[in-house]
Amino acid sequence: DTAVSQTPKYLVTQMGNDKSIKCEQNLGHDTMYWYKQDSKKFLKIMFSYNNKELIINETVPNRFSPKSPDKAHLNLHINSLELGDSAVYFCASSPGTANGYTFGSGTRLTVV
Amino acid sequence: QKEVEQDPGPLSVPEGAIVSLNCTYSNSAFQYFMWYRQYSRKGPELLMYTYSSGNKEDGRFTAQVDKSSKYISLFIRDSQPSDSATYLCAMRRNTDKLIFGTGTRLQVFP
């Protein structure tokens, strides 16, 4: 039974489109995150939610909008996709804000 | 300068070797230190979690933190081909966001 699941695993789309990535965790964790991993494997935090409340909002273009309908779900919507948005997006969760994270398997986004 | 520096490798070793992976950091406020392993096309998985300075051992893995030198290490004993992956160090201040190193790619050949 997958702990942190993301859909879709792969996403190929054209510039200018709007797309969403979904994340669900069944671990009962309170905190969820979105990270972006670039082609050089560097993981950078984008957003963090604790019990549906936004607690970290890094310097990310406002074309990216997270939504947490409940503490088990954190979705990421991206408007007007650009070539530079191509990356692997990871969702993660943790029991609190001072613990290690459990990551999903990633969504590989390619903008053409 | 990045907050967390890590040699990207690749590091190539024969099976059975002792592997040493390292990270340096600049922020003395970091208190929690972690090592993650990431296989190709998979998400990172937590290997080791330590608080403040000292050593922690788990099977073939030993994590060391030297806060005075702002230096952390992960040692892998009796390395196996299945250990071939990218190893990411990560650290945080208290309840702040987790900051990752860029990862070191390790290849263990039979």
Image (cartoon, rainbow, N blue to C red):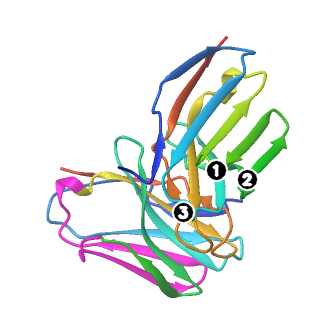
Q: Is residue A10 at all visible to an observer of this figure?
A: no
Q: Which residues are magenta?
A: A60-84
Q: Do discs 1 and 2 share a chain? A: yes
Q: Tell me the amino acid under the disc marked 2.
A: Ser
Is the Cβ of the residue at disc 1 closer than 8 Å to that at disc 2?
yes
Which residue is most to the left? A16
Which of labels 1 and 2 is toward the front? 1
Residue at (31, 71) in percent of width and height: A59
Tag 1 or tag 3, which sits nearer the N-term? 1
- Same chain? Circles 3 and 1: yes
Can you identify the residue that label 3 sits on? B98
Q: Residues within 10 Å of mark 2 (few under 14, many from 20)?
A: some
Which numbered disc, 3 or 2, marks the residue that appears first in the sequence? Answer: 2
Check disc 1 and report the residue beneath it.
Answer: B68
Numbered badge on residue B53: 2
What distance separates the C-alpha of mark 3 from that of mark 2? 18 Å
* Real-space CA distance between mark 1 and mark 2, rounded to the nearest whole angstrom: 9 Å
Frontmost of labels 3 and 1 is: 1
User: What is the tally of numbered marks visible in this picture?
Assistant: 3
Q: Is residue B101 above or below residue A78?
A: above
Crowdedness of circle 3 by 10 Å Cα count: few (<14), some, many (20+)? many
Which amino acid, by three-letter code, is at mark 3? Leu
Residues indicated by labels 3 and 2 sit on the same polypeptide chain: yes
